[in-house]
């Protein structure tokens, strides 16, 4: 007998390969058959004395410890019907395999190829199967299913072997689309059409006056990639209000609104008139008596509300506005394109202009002081532009105008990187969990985090700064399943929050489970590092592709945090509109591509400061304001407000004096609004500003969705799911379903929230996005597979259906008394164990003890009560010792029989109540 003194060291891969693999396994190939044993080789084993002093020799033996190791290729085919089939895998015995499959259905098939359980690069592959043999005319290409406004949509027609016949094409849709064809001289024709407005287009292809198979095709054209610019000018009616002199300081603290005879209420703007009195400036929309309310700190000032009368000639009429100039038909890049607007006979009204197209066109407006304006725009990219012209919020005759812009472009540049993301190990109950995010320029004092378990128990989580700008949320889960991690900055969810965090086996994987968020996806600055986070933990392993496209080439940096998240930063040398694309395994992640405006180098914008910004929460449909001080900066300020539903509205910016602006806005919905304030096109310090509208701000972390409609569904069969908004406040609920077909969908109110019903019309994968006040709820978007042979609608590109509901606040029954509500615990009292003398016999005036172990009984509250001959005992102490282990001590003063009652939540534990003799 002898024992090893040193611990054996595991051999390196090179040593193992040389000694074992090359000699033993080089002739072994593998495909779907499991590989033979692979050994772990131990080296540096202490020498064994042999011979005269022992066994006779001195050497270092190698010890082989065998383990079973599975390494295999596997493949499967997902058919259009949703059924799974197995292809044939042939091992070529040269390090490659051949996959053979004979399709039995027409349409898009998905081939998944895995090695050791992981997708190989590019897997799953998409393969289109057509049932038409040669000799027939067919059409294929992306332009038959989808496209982008202002960009050519292309497809190909094959007439090989079809004989003689006339070929004709037509495109019908929201806009006129120019069609161009090119004969490739090989039996195919390349077709391109240019849609100028988003919507659904019908493409008809006829051969010999008959539709070819699949015609007419339906293509969904989106506005992706379009850039928009706008201005608002024009005349307003000015009315002097009765009253005494008011100081400049008082004007800054006042706000005003005007209510029309129809009940429409809008903010109006206060200004000092040459007489010294205050007046209001507004756009008359109706004839008759209007009521003006002027308030200070929520209270009417003297003589408010005021009454004014609007006559017919003062009301703005868009039909009476005249527009002249060729620039509304055609234009040139990199030069001013001018047209004239005449509002002299149209009454009072604001003129708004927006131009949308391949580039963000610079707009200039020159007031000729005679009721006419010269307006110019300067695009940088050729293509089709849509010009919207409104007066008093109504379209001018001919608006929107479609303008063809020709000339040289600005050579947009694109940079792309790809990184492999590995799957994160499964997290166990009771282990230390961590979620990290980068958020530079803040303090940890303003951050807070909480974790909601699958059972509904919400607990605060620890949050700390790992290094400069990098923060980590720490928690220890007590249950298996999907947890909700909420991270807030100044009580508002950070970008990406609430997060899904799975404890135990992952239920799904894919691009729809990737999250991205951070300042760099909202705004950026020229020449600076603009950062954002990407969380791929829930999505599994795959290829993450990051692209930045815009006026200049981007420098992209990537840092893997090794916990299923990463930090991405990019730097660009030119300002302008950029598009940031994020793809996981060649599929866009939710909300990608992101449109980001890169501001010019800061300049004077950093000098500006904000004062009197609304604190706490403000009310919807009531005007609010704040002050912006120039502090010597030279330039122009503009501001807009974006609501939780995504609706944008311009703020009214008024120069109070040479050094101050007044910014007024009126939110139209409850929830978190963002106010973007820019000086010379650059965000001022703190912009965009967050403001809470409504007392009960909607909380997306409190919203849950469940039901059969979020699991596997059947094609052509109605299904539903519930969106539970209890205790989530009121807000905007937006449900969007993307898939191979449109779905019939409705949304109705139920006791616990809202029921969404829909019917999938074609087999395949559907992605259901559920947003609450513009934030994805946990689990969204949900991936739902529709199975079955029934096909009500033809499959062609991704189709989208949506519904939006303004919700009402809902509370649970347990909360009707407006007191705190107990969480929904998931526990089993029968699994609680107890032991100790204190459960059998007790002694007067001494500490009597027993222990309770609820380690395997789920989550709940331990209740202990002791009752004797003369009432409750003297004292009871419960100490939690960790992992649901409790020590209980109690003291009694009287002799007799006592009852010891121990409950885990509402239920007695085994043996309770215990009878104890004193």
Image (tube, helix red, strand yellow):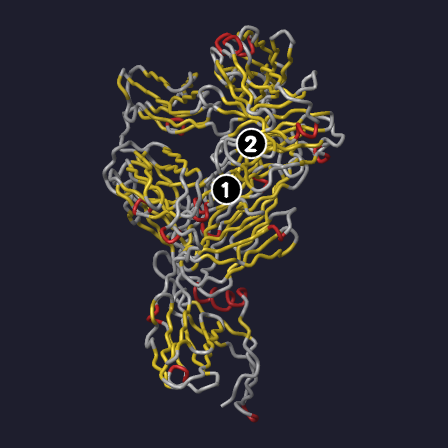
Q: Is residue 305 left or right of residue 219?
A: right
Viewer-closest of 216 and 140: 216
Is residue 711 positioned above or below 475 on the image?
above
Q: Position of residue 481 (x, y in %)?
A: 40, 57
Residue 222 showing in the rendered view = yes
Viewer-closest of 902 and 51: 902
Packing grade of label 2 (10 A; few <14, some 14-19, many >=20) is: many
Q: Position of residue 541 (x, y in %)?
A: 46, 51
The Cα–Cα distance between marks 1 and 2, rounded to whole angstroms, is: 19 Å
Packing grade of label 1 (10 A; few <14, some 14-19, many >=20) is: some
Q: Position of residue 542 (x, y in %)?
A: 47, 49
Marker disc for residue 641: 2
Q: Position of residue 64 (x, y in %)?
A: 46, 74
Discs 1/2, front = 1
- Disc 1 marks which residue? 695
Q: Secondary structure at mark 2?
A: strand
């Amino acid at each position: 007998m002898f024992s090893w003194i040193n611990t054996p060291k595991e051999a390196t891969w090179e040593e193992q390969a040389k000694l074992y693999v090359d000699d033993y396994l080089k002739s072994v190939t593998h495909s779907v058959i499991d590989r033979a044993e692979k050994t772990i080789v131990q080296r540096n084993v202490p020498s064994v004395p042999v011979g005269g002093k022992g066994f006779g020799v001195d050497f270092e033996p190698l010890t082989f410890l065998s383990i079973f190791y599975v390494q295999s290729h596997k493949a499967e085919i997902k058919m259009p019907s949703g059924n799974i089939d197995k292809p044939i895998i042939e091992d070529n015995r040269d390090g490659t395999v051949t996959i053979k499959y004979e399709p039995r259905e027409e349409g898009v098939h998905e081939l998944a190829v895995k090695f050791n359980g992981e997708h190989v690069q590019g897997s799953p592959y998409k393969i289109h199967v057509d049932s038409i043999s040669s000799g027939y005319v067919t059409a294929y290409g992306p332009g038959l299913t989808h496209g982008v406004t202002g960009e050519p949509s292309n497809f190909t027609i094959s007439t090989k072997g079809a004989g003689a016949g006339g070929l004709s094409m037509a495109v019908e849709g929201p806009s006129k689309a120019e069609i161009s064809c090119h004969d490739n001289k090989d039996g195919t024709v390349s077709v391109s059409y240019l849609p100028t407005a988003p919507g659904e287009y019908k493409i008809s292809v006829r051969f010999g006056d008959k539709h070819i198979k699949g015609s007419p095709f339906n293509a969904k054209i989106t506005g992706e990639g379009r850039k928009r610019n706008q201005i608002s000018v024009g005349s307003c009616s000015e009315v002097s209000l009765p009253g005494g002199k008011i100081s400049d300081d008082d004007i800054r603290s006042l706000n005003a609104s005007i209510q029309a005879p129809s009940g429409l209420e809008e903010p109006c703007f206060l200004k000092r008139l040459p007489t010294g009195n205050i007046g209001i400036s507004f756009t008359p929309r109706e004839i008759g008596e209007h009521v003006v309310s002027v308030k200070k700190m929520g209270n009417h000032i003297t003589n408010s509300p005021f009454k004014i009368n609007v006559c017919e000639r003062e009301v703005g009429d868009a039909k009476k506005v005249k527009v002249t100039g060729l620039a509304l038909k055609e234009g040139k890049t990199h030069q001013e394109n001018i047209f004239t607007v005449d509002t002299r006979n149209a009454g009072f009204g604001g003129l708004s202009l927006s131009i949308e197209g391949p580039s963000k066109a610079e707009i200039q407006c020159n007031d000729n002081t005679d009721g006419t304006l010269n307006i110019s725009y300067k695009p940088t990219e050729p293509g089709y532009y849509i010009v919207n012209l409104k007066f008093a919020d109504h379209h001018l005759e001919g608006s929107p105008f479609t303008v063809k812009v020709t000339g040289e472009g600005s050579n947009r540049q694109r940079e792309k990187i790809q990184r492999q993301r590995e799957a994160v190990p499964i997290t166990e109950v009771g282990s230390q969990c961590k979620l990290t995010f980068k958020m530079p320029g803040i303090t940890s004092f303003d951050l807070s985090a909480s974790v909601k378990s699958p059972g509904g128990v919400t607990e605060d989580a620890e949050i700390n700064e790992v290094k400069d700008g990098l923060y980590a949320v720490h928690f220890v889960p007590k249950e298996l399943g999907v947890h909700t991690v909420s991270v807030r900055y100044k009580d508002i969810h950070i970008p990406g929050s609430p997060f899904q965090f799975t404890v135990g086996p992952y239920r799904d994987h894919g691009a729809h489970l990737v999250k991205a968020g951070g300042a760099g996806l909202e705004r950026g600055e020229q020449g600076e590092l603009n950062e954002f986070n990407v969380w791929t933990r829930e999505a599994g392993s795959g290829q993450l592709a990051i692209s930045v496209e815009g006026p200049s080439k981007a420098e992209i940096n990537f840092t893997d945090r090794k916990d299923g998240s990463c930090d991405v930063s990019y730097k660009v040398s030119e300002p302008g509109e950029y598009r940031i694309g994020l793809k996981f395994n060649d599929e866009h992640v939710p909300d990608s591509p992101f449109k980001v405006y890169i501001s010019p180098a800061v300049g004077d914008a950093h000098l500006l400061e904000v004062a009197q910004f609304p604190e706490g929460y403000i009310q919807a449909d009531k005007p609010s304001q704040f002050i912006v001080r120039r502090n010597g900066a030279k330039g122009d300020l503009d501001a807009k407000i974006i609501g939780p539903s995504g609706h944008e509205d311009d703020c009214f910016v008024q120069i109070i004096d040479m050094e101050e602006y007044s910014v007024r806005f009126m939110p139209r919905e409850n929830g978190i609004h963002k106010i973007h304030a820019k000086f010379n096109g650059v965000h001022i310090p703190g912009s965009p500003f967050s403001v809470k509208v409504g007392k009960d701000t909607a909380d997306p972390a409190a919203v849950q969705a469940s039901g059969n409609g979020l699991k596997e569904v059947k094609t052509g069969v109605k299904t539903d799911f519930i969106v539970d908004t209890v205790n989530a406040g009121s807000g905007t609920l937006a449900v969007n379903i993307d898939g191979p077909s449109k779905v019939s969908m409705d949304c109705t109110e139920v006791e616990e929230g809202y029921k969404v019903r829909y019917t999938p019309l074609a087999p395949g994968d559907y992605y259901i996005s559920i947003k609450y006040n513009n934030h994805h709820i946990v689990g969204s978007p949900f991936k739902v597979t529709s199975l079955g042979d029934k096909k009500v609608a033809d499959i062609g590109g991704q189709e989208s259906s949506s519904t939006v509901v303004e919700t009402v606040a809902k509370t649970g029954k347990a909360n009707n008394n407006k007191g705190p509500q107990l969480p929904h615990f998931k526990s089993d009292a029968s699994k609680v164990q107890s032991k100790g003398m204190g459960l059998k016999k007790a002694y007067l005036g001494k500490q009597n003890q027993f222990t309770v172990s609820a380690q395997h009984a789920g989550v709940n509250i331990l209740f202990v009560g002791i009752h004797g001959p003369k009432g409750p005992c003297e004292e009871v102490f419960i100490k939690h010792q960790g992992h649901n282990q409790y020590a209980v001590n109690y003291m009694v003063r009287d002799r007799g029989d006592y009852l010891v009652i121990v409950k885990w939540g509402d239920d007695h534990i085994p043996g309770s109540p215990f009878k104890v003799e004193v």
